[in-house]
Image (cartoon, rainbow, N blue to C red):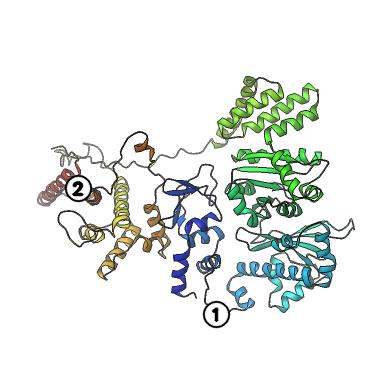
Amino acid sequence: MIYQDTINKIMDTSRIEEVVGDFVSLKKRGTSLIGNCPFHNEKTPSFHVSVTKGIYKCFGCGKGGDSVHFIMDHEKYSYPEALKYLAQKYNIEVEETEESPQVIEANNARESLYVVSLYAANYFANELWTGEQGRAIGLSYFKERGFREDIIKKFELGYSPDQWDALILSAAAAGHKEEYLEKTGLAIRNEKGKVYDRFRGRVMFPIHNFTGRVIGFGGRTLKTDKNVPKYVNSPESDIYHKSNVLYGLFQAKKAIRDLDNCYLVEGYADVLSVHQANIENVVASSGTSLTIEQIRLIGRFTKNVTILYDGDAAGIKASLRGLDMILEEGLNVKVVNFPDGHDPDSYMHKVGAGVFKTYIENNRKDFILYKADILLKEAGTDPIKRAGIIRDIVESIAKIPDEIKVSVFVRECSHLLQVSEHTLMTELNKMRNAKFKKGNQSNQGQQYQRPSANNQSFSPYPDGPPDNLFDDNAGPDLPEMEIVADDDLLQEHEIIRLLLAFGHELVSWDNIDNMYIGSFIMQNLSDVTFENEICKLIIQNYKEEIENGHLPVANQFITNENRKIADLAITLSTSPHSLSENWYNKHQIYVRDETVNLKATILGGLYHLKKKKVERLLLGLLQEIKAEPDPVNQDILMGKYAFMKNVEREISKFLGSVVIK
């Protein structure tokens, strides 16, 4: 249990732009920061961060919250875990009773996988620096490869002793269960039920997630036995999914964001070498084929990717086939090829950090042009092969979503391929049309979804009950109640928005003194019943707070324990749009701010809500009149209808609406 004072300190210290910025590349737009949402795939940013309000909101998928909720949603943490994460980020001490590894494991099975993985990483690192085998074999290997001690420590490299159960015995002595060693893949159980270490006699590369927690390992053997696999990696687990992970991203994410570029290499050693050359914005796909998830992961931080290829020709050609995915995700791709069969690791250690860095900066090529150059050299003068290569290149260009980039590459490739731009564009359009038709075919049979009712009010009888009201065959059918309900919800949301935005400000009209707008609104809602359950809860909470002598503020609802209340408060406190300064600065167009005349803003919200409620009452009365067989009761209902119609007219006068007389 975390003390409330500590929670308050964490909430006060956390900066939403810093917390979200660890995971998403944010750019300034108006009064907000925007970026690509980390919770759903998108190419056009709809994820907004409000620094002043301390909240985030995605207008694409609807996710929203404060710093704690962001960590909970992104890392799948519980509330206490998210608080501890933020406390660690801002060096805030969290007081709580000390728990043994056994208690931690019992409390949270998934957390136990993290705990045992961290233990293993510390164990391997300790063996590397202090173990007899580790220093003689593991540390010597890294130093012979030319890696500095600061790089070895930065990536928490280690060594696993060449024994069957060294880690298992050590973990058991520390109170960790074999069950979790198995679930993380650190231990394997054979057919006879015997448990043994997966990694034995290997130098170890811990794999971290976004937040720096150890989720898996890669182990390299130092033996020359061809029957022993060179690399062994952790299997998939509840915390490690290799298609969603990039090695080195935790160490590289700040540099990627700052430099607006990500270097992509193939293996662990390549990442270490590039870092040692003082180039920190580098990650690796860890020997696996590049996945869409990994590309989107990079896309959160930058739209620019530079591939550092191995110099092997066969490897280059194989890699080309997978890079179209990067183009399709809207990223800009450049390529650096190393000479004489070198990979980034070997070339850096051959020429040194300074020359390596200069070489990369001077030898970057656009992927499309690089691909065309490589394939044309291979085709030589064979016309059939050249035709196939031209189609291959055009197919890559067709995947680029940005039309300006497409036209630039078509022009460049026209010169390189010695084919007219018109021919290339014709082929490109054929490919796009074929893809479009294929997409349409796959969508056949799906039902058309009718759009929801619009926001305009609708009254079938603006003049009062018609003369033929009781004729079952006369006039239009009464509208369904859902249309009115939709309008009611919009108006109820508007009242909540006004309370959150202006409730703490003083009334400045009609000589009203010492009254807050929140209290003014609540007084004027005494005759209104809210229909939406969440709106009703917020109004009830607001009323109770005022009766207890407290004026609620927006943050109380934004951080409410009821996630539905918090989500609605966030949605109503944010907007996907911001007014550009150009409206006035360049065009001399002034757009009136709703705060300029708060009286009109507040009363407008109240009267629009009441008008909708009156319309609903009128509709209900019409239905009652139609169903009532007794003429006396009909007259009573007609009187009520006439009274409510007058109320509607008075409201409409204020709103400037016209009701036909």
Instruction: Classify mark 1: residues with Cα within 10 Å, few (<14), some (14-19) or many (20+).
Output: few
Question: Residue 394: horizontal and vertical position, in percent?
Answer: 66, 29
Type of amino acid at the residue the image marks with label 2: Leu
- Helix, strand or loop at disc 2? helix
Q: Which mark is residue 623?
A: none
Q: Which mark is residue 618?
A: 2
Which of label 2 and label 1 is nearer to you? 1
Q: What residue appears at the point 72 percent right and 30 percent down from the top-left corner? A: 372
Q: What residue appears at the point 88 percent right and 57 percent down from the top-left corner? A: 227
Is residue 577 positioned above or below 191 on the image? above
Identify which residue, 417 or 242, lies in the foreground.
417
Question: Residue 256: horizontal and vertical position, in percent?
Answer: 61, 50
Question: Residue 631: horizontal and vertical position, in percent?
Answer: 10, 48
Splitting the image into 4 quarters, where does residue 582 fall? top left
Q: In this view of the protein, can residue 162 be seen by the observer?
A: no
Left/right of residue 355 with respect to residue 15 in the rendered view: right
Q: Which residue is mark 1?
A: 97
Q: Earlier in the sequence, mark 2 or mark 1?
A: 1
What's the CA distance linking mark 2 and mark 1?
62 Å
